[in-house]
Image: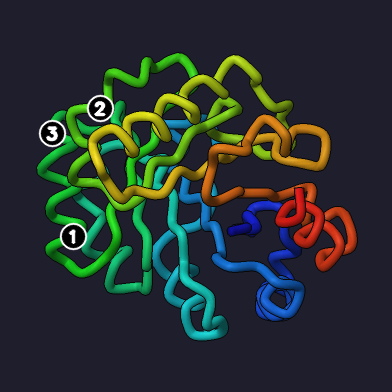
Amino acid sequence: MVAPSILSADFANLQTELGAIAEAGADWVHVDVMDGHFVPNLTIGVPVVASIKKVTKLPLDVHLMIENPEKYIEQFIKAGSDYLTIHVEATNDPLRVLKRIRELGAKAGISLRPGTPLSAITPFLSELDLVLVMTVEPGFGGQNFMKDQVSKISELKRLREEKKMNYLIEVDGGVNESTIGECHDADVLVAGNYVFKNDYTKAIRKLKES
């Protein structure tokens, strides 16, 4: 599946952009939420997520790059998040937050910075619907793909098969036609610049075919 990141979209014409990626074959809409504290950038919040939900039928894949996500998960789920991903580094009790996301009716996801070992999230795998592997440092679009993170993708697939779990593996950061080969074990690809700076249909088709 392909989840274009609207961080790279034209925010002045967001409804049009959402319609265009849906028509081009996108499966999800990836929404990057940054608070200026957990990462050095500030993006959108709950009201924009609610507005997006009103104008697209695609599932909203909301990635919270924020401190203390437990304070805000209920708001983001009420706004329309279908998948809600938190960072393992952002909370003292990831398991409690993940369980609460599911209780509130959304799919629970977890992510980790490139410098965080996979062992930091393995205790929670059975409680997950989604694992988001960051192949760039979270916080900004347009960065280069970090090949040293590919081993996390492969290991997540191995663990899923070994323990008979059902989480999806998502990759975010520098995904394009040159790096897609590194992501063959992933289920969902997040792409921002590669989709929105090119022909949407051709870019999405290329990611899926590759």
In the image shown, does 32 or 127 lie closer to the viewer? Answer: 127
Report the side of 96 relative to 37 (left or right): left
Per the rendering, the mark at residue 121 is none
In the image shown, does 23 or 196 lie closer to the viewer? Answer: 23
Looking at the rendering, which quadrant does residue 9 occupy?
bottom right
* Amino acid carrying mark 1 in the image: Arg
Q: x, y percentage for residue 62?
A: 43, 57
Q: x, y percentage for residue 120?
A: 27, 21
Residue appearing at x 52%, y 82% in the figure: 57
Residue appearing at x 50%, y 44% in the figure: 170
Mark 1 or 2, which is nearer the eye? 2
Q: How many C-alpha atoms fall within 10 Å of the one at disc 3: few (<14), some, or many (≥20)?
A: few
SS at badge 2? helix
Mark 2 or 3, which is nearer the eye? 2
| Residue under label 3 | 93
Alpha-carbon span between mark 2 and mark 3: 14 Å
Residue appearing at x 16%, y 46% in the figure: 97
Alpha-carbon span between mark 1 and mark 3: 15 Å
Q: How many C-alpha atoms fall within 10 Å of the one at disc 2: few (<14), some, or many (≥20)?
A: few
Looking at the rendering, which quadrant does residue 50 occupy?
bottom left
Per the rendering, the mark at residue 122 is 2
